[in-house]
Image (cartoon, helix red, strand yellow):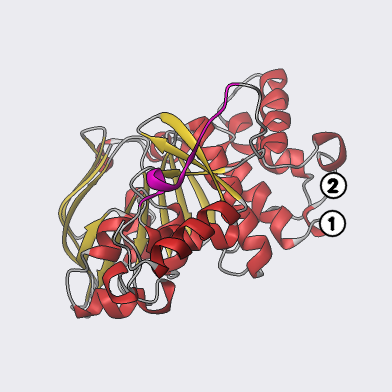
Amino acid sequence: MISFEGVTKRYKDGRAAVDGLSFEVKKGEFFVLIGPSGCGKTTVLKMMNRLIESSSGQIAIDGRPVGDYKLNELRWNIGYVLQQIALFPHMSIAENVALVPELMGRPREEVTKTVDALLYKVGLDPNVYRSKRPSELSGGQQQRVGVVRALAADPDILLMDEPFSALDPVTREKLQNDLLEIQRSIHKTIVFVTHDMREALKLGDRICLMNGGKIVQLGTPSEIVHQPANEFVREFLGDAIGGSTDRLGLPPLTAEDLIDPLELDGRLIAEGAVTIGADTEVSELLWHLAAEERLLVRRGDEVIGLLERERALKRIAREFEEGGDN
């Protein structure tokens, strides 16, 4: 979907913000760029929609170099969400969301339906919020509108540059869950920049950890946690996980080992429940359980079971007491 081949961004002073990057973001993937301040992650993001031009190498979308696209064609197919939401203060919420699809010439009736459907999707009743101004909304509500606005033109790609970092922890957690739920229904290709490893582990299908303009390690959350490439990765993980499974002495269990099979008699599943992979290991799973009472467990595209906090923690504790021999 998005490919980088030997991409470098070098400024006039000779400094390379990005140095020879090669990687691919798969279609429908939630891809997280993470690293310390100044590592080049936001530069990588902005080169995708040509807010910053690369110095050398090639960036392509669907096999076509980004330089071959007309700029409006490229950017209309790429939604962009910033930490600074930048809603137009003089416009209503509906007008903010409708702006790009209207510029694209889409019929007004279609645009109105899209705006209402997207507001509903992020928990904002359009009958209540459609006519409000941005100043009448909380920070979390404004950021929801920012996400909706980026999706209004139905782009294939969504770029998100630390969109939740300025929010309080409770609101941030809720928006992370909302984003995961939206992604399950719309299957966009999302590239998400963060400096928070806990956020990266929760959201990402794969994580690209950068330092000094280069990739230090690229892999799934489980690979990053359990097979850190070097000491920099281990240190960057830091308090996010408290160490690997082996260092913590946790039992070698996965989410699949702990699930209750889904019953066919109408058992209630929490609305908007977070879904995790069947191979999610205990050290990562504990962070999900700290935030969620119930989790759905999937293998591939199939939901195979339900994991409830109390039962799962009791099982983990029992295995821990027995030394993980089971």
Quadrant for the N terminus in the image: top left
Residue under label 2, please give it: 132
Where residue 8 appears, as percent x and y from the top left, is 18, 62
Q: Quadrant of residue 110?
A: top right
Q: Residue at x 62, y 42 (%)?
A: 149
Q: Which residues are magenta?
A: 254-264
Dot 2 falls on a residue whose secondary structure is loop
Q: Would residue 113 be found to the left or right of residue 234 on screen?
A: right
Q: CA distance from mark 1 to mark 2?
A: 6 Å
Q: Is residue 45 left or right of residue 12?
A: right
Q: Residue at x 29, y 53 (%)?
A: 220
Q: Amino acid at mark 1?
A: Glu
Count of numbered labels shown in the rendering: 2
**Residue type at the position of mark 2:** Lys
Give neighbour class at mark 2: few <14, some 14-19, many 20+ (Cα, 10 Å).
some
Q: Is residue 18 above or below residue 148?
A: below
Q: For mark 1, what is the residue?
A: 136
- Nearest to the observer: residue 236 or residue 11: 236
Circles 1 and 2: CB atoms closer than 8 Å:
yes
Question: Closer to the camera, 54 or 7?
Answer: 7
| Residue in front for this viewpoint, 95 or 238 | 238
Instruction: Note whether residue 265 is visible.
Output: yes
- Please provide percent x and percent y for residue 206: 31, 51
Q: Residue at x 47, y 65 (%)?
A: 317
Q: Position of residue 108 (x, y in %)?
A: 70, 22
State the quadrant of the C terminus: bottom left
Q: Secondary structure at mark 1?
A: helix
